[in-house]
Amino acid sequence: MKQVVQNYKSGELALLDVPVPGCKPGGVLVRSAFSLISTGTELMKVSEAGMSMLGKARSRPDQVAKVVQSVAANGVPATYRKVMGKLDSYTPLGYSLCGVVEQVGAGIDDVKAGDLVACAGNEHALHAELNWVPKNLYVPVPDGVAARHAAFGTVGSIALQGVRQGESRLGEVALVIGLGLIGQLVTQLLNASGVRVVGVDPDPARCELAERLGAAACGDPGSASVESAVAELTGGMGVDQVYLAAGGSSNQPVELAARLCRDRGRVIDIGKCRLDLPWNAYYEKELDVRFSRSYGPGRYDPEYELQGRDYPIGYVRWTERRNLACFLDLIARGSVDVEPLVSHVADFEDAVETYRRLEEGEIKAVAVLFRYTPASDDDAPAAEAPQVTVPKVPEVPRPSGRTGAARRSGPVRLAFVGAGNYASSMLLPHLTGRDGVELSTVVTTTALSAANAQRKFGFGKATTDLDAVLGDPAVDAVFVVTRHSSHAELTRRALLAGKAVFVEKPLALTEEELAGVLAAVEESGNDRIQVGFNRRFAPLLREAKERFGVRGGPASLRYLVNAGRLEHGSWYLRQDTEGSRFAGEGGHFVDTASWLLDADPVSVYAAAPAGGEDLQIVLGYPDGSTATISYVTSGPASFPKETLDLIADNKVLRLDDFVRAAVHDGRRRQWVGSRLPKARDKGQNAELAAFVKAVRTGGPMPVPLESLAATTTATLAVRTALASGVPVTLAGAR
């Protein structure tokens, strides 16, 4: 296996081939998924290794003192050999990661092979493909927490222990000096505790980030704005507590702490900064100076860390391991958001180059993650990457010479199950008064809504009795436009009743629901189904695709969906019954991408910030094409909802929110339609026309059932990918 190492004498960094560690009793063997670079602690160590011997001595006076003691005890030659031998050795880097348990040692019963765990320790959670981790230095990752976020567990525990040492109380005001990785996490933890925070850092970008994540105000340590903010928030009394999360040789942080802290306030040192305390300032205010020791009680105790001897909770409430579990729980509940802190994600194979770029300032980062590739055949993990099987679509026998159901001689008679906002605004206006269409019956759960729909759109009948509609031989097709949780069951029943079905997205919220729909197709021999994936029918997009032409090679597709935030109380937010928001509407975007790429996806990867709804989804396709869907709810409402770029063969197809499109072929830009924005048309009218035509003529449905099933499977696989933190293979995909 490979591991990042450094020679402290020469400063050399290397990605070294090392033996796989054994799985000893009392711990687990973990295959890394993501490990976190501590841009403060680790870069300081890397920087020190590049110094001259004199520089190293100046930076570590504690080690120099040990050398002097060794010289006195052992003499110069022996001490020299000992020191040079230690310096001229490879040492590991890293102390915070998330990975999958590959093997369980004797005495471990709280996890099993295949479980996702967060790991801590500068001897056990290293930048390496495999690590052996003792029991008290790992915790299972809660459901819903992505692996890349769980990799923050150790640094989160450091910040959490610092906050505990500060004994923060609801309503207090704190000053956080240093807004690097630890400072940003301390700020969020204090904010979650009901403490108002003023941040200090010379980097304006870090100040802006801290304010976005909850700080009341932030500024440069030399600016008057910081003192003004403290005075305003505290009535001139000074902050209750100061957290020193800065590094470096300047004594400015401790001097600033004394100036802005209240009488008998608390100063907590978390980072590694100069601590020449101004005696008068600290004495006159009787400031309480405290130190925070790493991840919490148990740190540096070999009986706790290596032998697994826990401290009784009645005596030590928050140990290293309990802090680690607590921080992951805060991520799971959305109280802490680590995704905005991720400045860069690098492949583990590029580790040495990544350190170089960080040290030379090419990468400006708060947090950097290493992403590990799946194991090779010679070094395969016990737990395989997750797979989701695309259901096999039943083959429905057709009458000789036919591709569909019987041709209708009269109007196509439609029944609507549900008549809410979407049906009333986006579907029914395109059907009312359409030649060859008869709005037969509307079914709703309340009599009044059925009556309103009948009056507004001219339905022949209004009822609350679904069975009466399904049993009516005069009804040719049923529209299912109800809440998401009922779609699959209503579709299944309509298929079994022999009706053609138009079901608004989603077709299903779970794999079991999708399987139930396909079982109904097989049982009834009725595959006359269309899901409301209307964007592939949008005239502007269809024309743009035609002008783009046939691809000769793989494509890259980028799709930004500025979904916006939902209003409080929206039923879309009822995830326990209606599924996630993306499960409800994400099929739109998966289908559009697949239609543009002329294939169904074969893999799905997804990542999301903790506690948020923003998603980054990468779909892989058989020919090597990829589609990245950025589904965000945090964007401004003034920005377009959907923008799309398709890039291949030295050409670009650009779509701007279904009002304007262009194709760039390397020589010129070819506008689709007109340069001027058109009325937004997302294809509902054309989609409905295609569905009605298929029902009337008995021809094939507008979208093959195989594609509908594949899109639904890929959409649902996003949940699996988020939970696992690794790509999901869609087994059986075409």
Image (cartoon, rainbow, N blue to C red):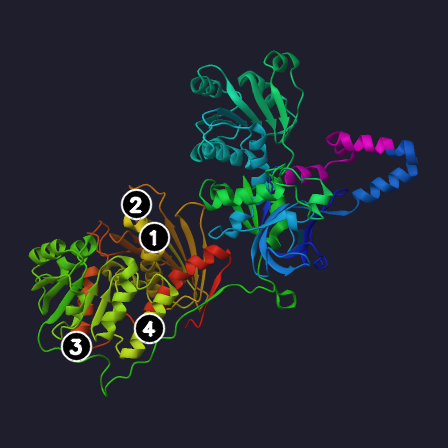
Residue at image position (32%, 68%) is 708
Judging from the image, what secondary structure is the residue with disc 3 in? helix
Q: Earlier in the sequence, mark 3 or mark 2?
A: 2
Quick one: quadrant of the C terminus?
A: bottom left
* Marks 4/3: CA–CA distance: 23 Å
Q: Earlier in the sequence, mark 4 or mark 3?
A: 4
Q: Is residue 222 above or below residue 334?
A: above
Q: Nearer the viewer, mark 4 or mark 2?
A: 4
Judging from the image, what secondary structure is the residue with disc 4 in? helix
Q: Percent from the top left, x then y, of residue 675?
A: 24, 51
Tell me the residue that label 1 is attached to: 581
Most foreground residue, 658 or 375? 375
Q: Are marks 1 and 4 in contact (CB under 8 Å)?
A: no
The single residue placed furthest to the front in the displayed view is 314
Q: Percent from the top left, x then y, of residue 271?
A: 62, 31
* Marks 4/2: CA–CA distance: 32 Å
Q: Are marks 1 and 2 in contact (CB under 8 Å)?
A: yes
Apparent side of residue 647 relative to residue 88 in the rendered image (left or right): left
Q: Earlier in the sequence, mark 4 or mark 2?
A: 4
Tell me the residue that label 2 is attached to: 566
Q: Are marks 4 and 2 in contact (CB under 8 Å)?
A: no
* Marks 1/2: CA–CA distance: 10 Å
Magenta extent: 41-69
